[in-house]
Amino acid sequence: MFNLFKKKKPPAVVADEEVEDTSSASLTYTITEDGTLTASFSLSSMDVITAKLFSDLMIEVGTAEVYLETLAIVRDRLLEEDREDLMELIFVNIASSGVLEDLVDGKGDDEPHIKPSDMFN
């Protein structure tokens, strides 16, 4: 069984080393204090290859794998900051929204959802 509350050691940070930005495209979501959701994007160049990479990014953002990986990143960061209280608040809010059930049930996916028990029937 997974221990979601287990603290992990933070990754080593290399000081005084510039990290080269090799991003072709980025998509950033923000929410204001009044609840307004905004999205911005950046493309390194206006060409067909970058546009294709950006469309791939937008497709992946909506998948269960990316959603779950994002939750794991949020969990790890909040645990590093010793803010289990905020982690619980965020996860309870997400769980009560029903979005996790939609991911498990496959709603919104183009592929049919097959329950593991159905594989044996």
Image: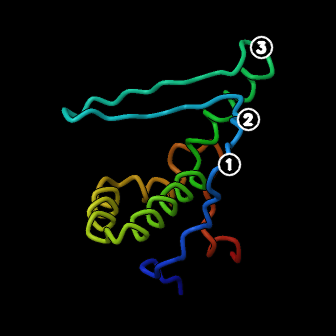
Q: Nearer the viewer, mark 1 or mark 3?
A: 1
| Residue at mark 1 | 17
Kind of element beneath mark 3:
loop
Q: Which mark is residue 47?
A: 3
Quadrant of residue 22 in the image?
Answer: top right
Q: Is residue 12 above or below residue 113?
A: below
Kind of element beneath mark 2:
loop
Quadrant of residue 60 in the image?
Answer: top right
Amino acid type for the residue under numbered disc 2 = Thr
Q: Earlier in the sequence, mark 1 or mark 3?
A: 1
Q: Earlier in the sequence, mark 1 or mark 2?
A: 1
Residue drawn at point x = 53 percent, y = 87 percent: 1
Q: Position of residue 39 (x, y in %)?
A: 44, 27
Q: Nearer the viewer, mark 1 or mark 2?
A: 1
43 displayed left or right of 98: right
Tell me how far mark 1 sits from mark 2, CA to CA: 15 Å
Tell me how far mark 3 sits from mark 2, CA to CA: 16 Å
Instruction: Report the front residue among 97 and 31.
Output: 31
Q: Is residue 79 above or below residue 37?
A: below
Quadrant of residue 58 in the image?
Answer: top right
Instruction: Report the front residue among 81 and 52.
Output: 81
Amino acid type for the residue under numbered disc 1 = Glu
| Residue at mark 2 | 22
